Image (cartoon, rainbow, N blue to C red):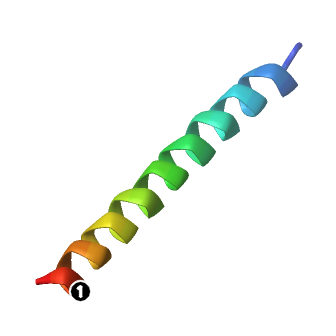
Amino acid sequence: MPIKLPVQVGWSAYEKAWEEEVDAVTVQAVGVSWV
């Protein structure tokens, strides 16, 4: 069974979501610091 591919794709999606979340938090922190 090719179980490595779904895991790899799932990890990539998780990693992308994590990076986007970090970017959103960073932008929010910068916005707060500007207020």
- Position in image of residue 16 (x %, y %): 56, 42
- In the figure, 11 relative to 30: above or below? above
The relative height of residue 34 versus residue 8 in the rendered view (above or below) is below
Q: Which residue is denoted by mark 1 in the rendering?
A: 33
Horizontal and vertical percent position of residue 21? 41, 56
Mark 1, Cα crowd under 10 Å, few <14 / some 14-19 / many 20+, is few
Amino acid under label 1?
Answer: Ser
* Quarter of the rendering occupied by the N terminus: top right
**Left or right: 18 in relation to 6:** left
Residue located at (67% from left, 36% from top): 12
Residue at the top extreme of this rendering: 1
At 26% from the left edge and 69% from the top edge, which residue is drawn?
A: 28
Tag 1 secondary structure: helix
Q: Nearer the viewer, residue 4 or 22?
A: 22
Q: Quadrant of residue 4?
A: top right
Q: Does residue 3 lie above or below 20 as drawn?
A: above
